[in-house]
Image (spheres, coloured by chain):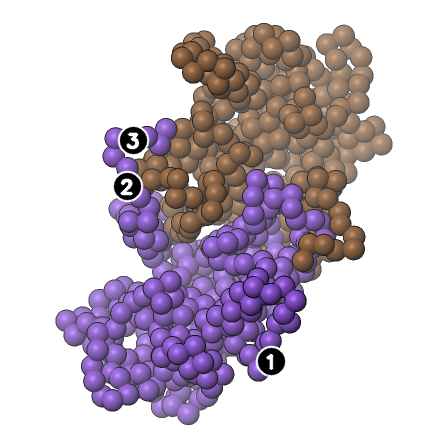
Chain colours: A purple, B brown
Amino acid sequence: MFENASRTELSSIGEFGLIDHLTKDILLQQNTVKGVGDDAAVIDQGNGKYTLVSTDMLIEGVHFDLSYFPLKHLGYKAITTNLSDIYAMNGTPKQVTVSVGLSNRFSLEAVEELYAGIRLACNQYKIDLVGGDTATAKQGLFISVTAIGEVESNKIVYRSGAKPLELVVVTGDLGAAYCGYQVLEREKRIFLDNPNAQPDLAGYDYIIERQLKPEARKDIVALLENLGVNPTSMIDISDGLASECFHLAKQSDVGITLYEEKVPIDPTTYNFARELELDPILTALSGGEDYELLMTITQQDYTKIENHPDFTVIGFVTESTEGMNLISKGGQKHPLKAQGWKAF
Amino acid sequence: MFENASRTELSSIGEFGLIDHLTKDILLQQNTVKGVGDDAAVIDQGNGKYTLVSTDMLIEGVHFDLSYFPLKHLGYKAITTNLSDIYAMNGTPKQVTVSVGLSNRFSLEAVEELYAGIRLACNQYKIDLVGGDTATAKQGLFISVTAIGEVESNKIVYRSGAKPLELVVVTGDLGAAYCGYQVLEREKRIFLDNPNAQPDLAGYDYIIERQLKPEARKDIVALLENLGVNPTSMIDISDGLASECFHLAKQSDVGITLYEEKVPIDPTTYNFARELELDPILTALSGGEDYELLMTITQQDYTKIENHPDFTVIGFVTESTEGMNLISKGGQKHPLKAQGWKAF
């Protein structure tokens, strides 16, 4: 069946290329306001409210490594990373469905651990677990989560609304989750070399927690409302700041210029990156899994967030002809590159 | 991590047992009307309409065998089987999200085939493909589909509304998809024994199509409306008639008595079951994957469907103390058993 005359390897097209390719020219025939191409799909309820739907998949050996990822944390992360997509539309997630495929290497007790994390996240974020499926797989573990939320139609924020001269703003700090991943991978290698070695994770709590138990920025949606800020575009940072900037810019048909010195990086992240002889800015630009929110705001809204510790202005929007740029600490302008952490 | 002091094998609890176990005592905190436990979750839009959400997973080697299941058909079936769950709530599906995990054994052309089937089903049923994910897996192929639909809140039909003395009604005919599966498995064995053998599928078109390209009963929801029939409970037949009767009975706290001679079985199904030396009624009771609708209606509604070729009355609802029964062609009363096809 797979011995076609012409065979194109999936690796030659890349993940984003593949989705684009498979879903291009899709005809929308129903009450769908936005299909593929944003953080969540948008469906019109016809009463001034939109339903938001986002779905994601986690695959063992690709997205997580159970040799150091506790199942309870995995369950928690599977939920929060999906909720993050709903918040990125300025919406409120309300329900999730969870489908789990797993081999018989897993015991009932192991699945209970996974669900303990799922249920903890649901309680923490006031989300109803409303459905799902548990099926036997021949190998491994994979989890598919769909999050459902709501937003008033006049409050929704897409990736596509950024305009030249607006400000690029990010919440929290970046690069920590990637560094946490590197700590855990390092300890795993040490353990494989010497099974009697004790893990040395002291001092790395913050970056490890950002990797193993990421939170979604539920608070930001409420904060934006309270501060009276209406972002013109928004996306969550799952693949690294640079990659997300490219998504916003492409959907909005603009360019973006970032200032390296403005990108918020926690001292633990900074120091660990130095330990690895990595430029700390790379952990933020290409690390991913931070689940912070990246948005653009008008200059008029600047004073509302100016002194707020949760928001940092890191750049500005330009005409698309200006392209994507990063101004280094030395004041040099470099082209911004959208490479995921795999390119490190 | 899995070397717990106590280890319970998943096989000891069973699929339904596992889902029940993992989702029991779930607290609903949002606008959820119905969570786990029906064909779809039900969410109140607050405007007289409910959003319906159903999710399902297909795993290679468990739910399908690519040695005879064409990828285009698989894509089609992944969609229609999910839509069936929305129709079973008397609702209208409008959107789907599709997540696909697959190994690099698959070429781009293979994934295009899969999506050709997905898109064909979406066009056929007027469904918007609004999101999803495509990720690399270490092995195999799995597909997770979430269907989203809508129903007016006064039209929704749950599994739980059946009352004693009501009639048990089924659409279409049963057992064909299971027989189609058996034909395909038989031809596969012959081919493995003798790779030069040509498949002999003549005369089996109907049952093979029921297995490889099942349709969801979109027409029934419209028909019920036109006929003025309000089912008191409904479920789709994915696991076999007997198993679905048990679900309806349990959720409605009633018993059900079926008449063997009333269960609609197509002649092709009947003859093929005979060829296999199987009692044809077993293909209907335990075969599954028919994606017909099983419902209960009041006696007042009987005359409305009495002569309609799409509906067959196959039994009646009793008090729960009567239990689950099957009246054989000889008039004997037997306890109805809910065994899936794996028990054959």
Q: Which residue is mark 1?
A: A202
Q: Which amino acid lies under the numbered mark 3 shown in the image of this protein?
A: Asn
Give the residue at x 67% y 58%.
B1
Question: Residue A236 at what x, y percent from top left?
Answer: 41, 68
Question: Residue B23 at what x, y percent from top left?
Answer: 68, 52
Give the residue at x 60% y 16%.
B264
Q: Residue A331's quadrant in the figure?
A: bottom left
Give the residue at x 46% y 47%.
B137
Q: Nearer the viewer, residue A198 or B64?
A: A198
Chain under callout 1: A
Quick check: A50 left or right of A136? Answer: left
For disc 3, the neighbor class at 10 Å (few under 14, some 14 to 19, many from 20) is few
Q: Residue furthest right?
A: B321
Q: Residue A213's quadrant in the figure?
A: bottom right
Q: Which residue is mark 3?
A: A4
What mark, if any, has residue B261 been given in the picture? none
Decide if residue A74 is in sight here: no
Q: Which residue is mark 2?
A: A8
Give the residue at x 83% y 28%.
B322
Question: Residue B119 at what x, y percent from top left?
Answer: 35, 39
Q: Which amino acid lies under the numbered mark 2 shown in the image of this protein?
A: Thr
Chain under callout 2: A
Q: Is residue A255 above or below residue B131?
A: below
Measure the alpha-carbon separation of dots 2 and 3. 10 Å
Q: Which amino acid lies under the numbered mark 1 shown in the image of this protein?
A: Ala
Measure the alpha-carbon separation of dots 3 and 1. 54 Å
